[in-house]
């Protein structure tokens, strides 16, 4: 598939456009403090992150898995520590000169507002968030709704995301082109399943530009 034949490029948010590292560290501090109160030995934030990456090799919910391992309860995710990746605004600006851009993401309520706060919304024409839509990835319904709203055939659309299971597999099944971005807790998650193999892989948003002829 030729990515440059696309009309629309859809993005995931977490660990794709938005860096969740700060928020995960905030949550990790709370979980670590609770684990110590519960009698466990204190681990560092770095060790918590290392464990999350290890659990992330198998997919699932790495943060929750680490909490269970260290004897802490799950800490609710908020948008408190989120930030846009440094190259996000520039990359979206350049891509939007040639392609229509949208978002398909599993997010808390207010995804569009956060994109606006991060200075990314001017380049994005559609936002489909699980909280507002009522169904999340990997359910194909959210992809189909976004494609319908865009008036775009699946084969003329690209999905860019960090998760082989939530982003690549359902998009491929619908006939969309796919790009995996290796960032965040699932950077080492590589299922040995052809249905999760993307058309291309990158390690940063900036690496998308040459793939799309920019």
Image: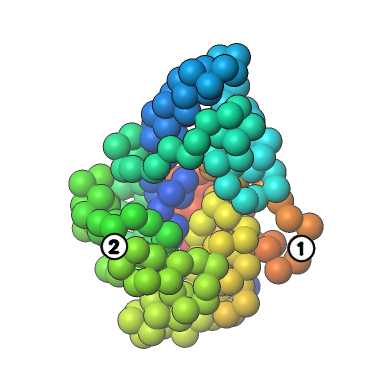
Place of residue 42 in the rendered image (x, y in percent of width and height, measured from the top left) = 56, 14
- Give the SS element for disc 1: loop
The residue lying furthest to the top in this view is: 41
Foreground of the two, 11 or 44: 44
Q: Which residue carries the number 2 mark?
A: 124
Q: Residue tagged by mark 1?
A: 193
Q: Quadrant of residue 63?
A: top right
Within 10 Å of disc 1 (Cα), the crowding (few <14, some 14-19, many 20+) is few
Q: What's the residue at 71%, 68% (across, down)? A: 195
- SS type, badge 2: loop
Which residue appears at 64% of the width and 43% of the height? 56
Mark 2, Cα crowd under 10 Å, few <14 / some 14-19 / many 20+, is: many
In this picture, residue 60 sits left or right of residue 118: right
Residue at 52% across / 76% down in the picture?
140
Furthest toward the front, the residue is: 38
Quadrant position of residue 178:
bottom right
Q: Earlier in the sequence, mark 2 or mark 1?
A: 2
Q: Is residue 78 above or below residue 72?
A: below
Q: Nearer the viewer, mark 2 or mark 1?
A: 1
| Viewer-nearest residue: 144 or 109 | 109
**Residue 161 position in % (x across, y down):** 51, 56
Question: Which quadrant is the C terminus positioned in?
Answer: bottom left
Using the numbered discs, state the Cα–Cα distance from disc 2 to disc 1 in whole angstroms. 31 Å
Q: Quick one: 99 or 153, which is closer to the camera?
A: 153
Horizontal and vertical percent position of residue 3: 54, 68
Please name the residue shown 39% across and 42% down the image: 76
């Amino acid at each position: 598939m030729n990515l440059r034949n696309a009309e629309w490029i859809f993005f995931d948010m977490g660990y794709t456009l938005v860096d969740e590292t700060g928020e995960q560290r905030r949550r990790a501090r709370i979980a670590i403090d609770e684990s110590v109160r519960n009698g466990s030995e204190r681990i560092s934030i770095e060790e918590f992150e290392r464990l999350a990456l290890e659990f992330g090799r198998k997919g699932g919910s790495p943060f929750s898995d680490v909490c269970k391992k260290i004897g802490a309860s799950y800490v609710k995710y908020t948008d408190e520590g989120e930030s846009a990746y440094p190259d996000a605004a520039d990359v979206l600006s350049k891509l939007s000169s040639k392609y229509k851009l949208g978002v398909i993401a599993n997010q808390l309520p207010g995804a569009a507002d956060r994109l606006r706060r991060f200075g990314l919304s001017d380049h994005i024409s559609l936002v489909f968030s699980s909280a507002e839509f009522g169904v999340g990835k990997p359910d194909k319904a959210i992809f189909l709704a976004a494609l319908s709203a865009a008036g775009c055939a699946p084969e003329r659309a690209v999905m860019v995301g960090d998760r082989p299971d939530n982003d690549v597999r359902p998009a491929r099944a619908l006939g969309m082109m796919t790009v995996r971005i290796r960032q965040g807790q699932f950077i080492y998650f590589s299922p040995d399943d052809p249905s999760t193999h993307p058309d291309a892989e990158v390690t940063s948003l900036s690496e998308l530009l040459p793939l799309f002829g920019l």
